[in-house]
Image (cartoon, grey):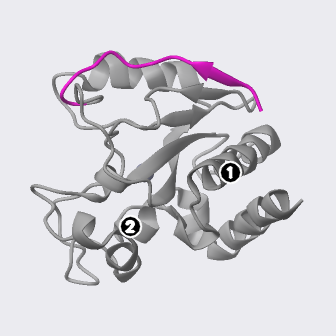
Amino acid sequence: MKIIDKFLTENDYTRPPGRKIAEKRAVILHWVGVPRQKAPAVWDYFEHGCAGKIYASAHYCIDLDGTVYRFIPDDSVAYHCGSSQIDPQSGKIYTDWARAIFGKYAKEPKRNSPNNAAIGIEMCVLDAEGNFAAETLQAAVELTAYLCKTYQIPIERVGTHNMVVGWKDCPRLWTRYPDKFEDFKKEVIGLLNG
Ligand SMILES: [Zn+2]
């Protein structure tokens, strides 16, 4: 796994200046949502498209060729899994899974959010169905295992954006086919045990 540091400029909307993550409780995976968009373009979107306007970012982005870009240091806050909208299905802002894992970080969305306790990974995709290139998937397995090992995050705390915010179709492939996400986690477990 090759990691390239390409840090976002500190900005209230993407990389809040001086804001450290409170705890590293979970790893949350996302898709970028735009077929064949490459990681440097995602960086560009956060750096220029979101700064000053839209709260959005992630710690990592994995490119179509499996290159891992680090946009935000692990110890700082990124905006990837917070919400202020009620999920029509559950009637709550965060899912049962999220509230069990994040506790106080999933109770008061205005003042606190799972972003204070989660590392976020964006994954580039091949198409609108959200299929991943084999290289992207492999790097995601390696990066997730590395984060789990480094910060003692158990596999039960590896989740998708959809598992935190129930109405989010992110990453689409794993929202539609949860079995594929289970397969992904098995690969991570395999690496951790191997
Ligand atoms: Zn997402």
What residue would you read off at disc 2?
A: 164
- What is the span of residues highlighted in magenta in the rendered image? 1-13
x then y, percent, for residue 35: 58, 37
Q: Taking the image as drawn, is residue 38 in sight? A: no
Q: Is residue 181 left or right of residue 102?
A: right
Residue depth check, mark 1 versus mark 2: number of the one nearer the observer:
2
- Is residue 142 located in the magenta-colored stretch of the structure? no
Is 77 left or right of 113, judged from the image as shown? right
Q: Give the numbered dot on residue 78.
A: none
Give left or right: position of 35 versus 168: right
Quick one: SS at disc 1?
loop
> In the picture shown, does residue 79 fall above or below 25?
above
Identify which residue, 159 or 116, lies in the foreground: 116
- Dot 1 alpha-carbon crowd within 10 angstroms: few under 14, some 14 to 19, many 20 or more: some
Comes first in the chain, label 1 or label 2: 1
At which x and y percent is residue 121?
53, 44
Q: Which residue is more in the foreground, 55 or 59?
A: 59
Taking the magenta stretch, the answer to whether it contains residue 9 is yes
How many marks are shown on the rendered structure?
Answer: 2
In terms of secondary structure, where does tag 2 sit? helix
For the C terminus, the quadrant is bottom right
Cα distance between the residues tagged 1 and 2: 21 Å
Which quarter of the figure is the N terminus placed in? top right
Query: Residue farthest to the left?
Result: 110
Q: Which residue is mark 1?
A: 131
**Residue 3 in view here:** yes
Give me the residue at 43% from left, 29% from top: 72
In the image, is the residue at mark 1 within 8 Å of ligand 1 by its beta carbon?
no
At 50% from the left and 50% from the top, the residue drawn is 30
Above or below, 157 relative to 21 = below
Question: Given the image, on which type of amino acid does mark 2 rest?
Answer: Val
Q: Are marks 1 and 2 in contact (CB under 8 Å)?
A: no
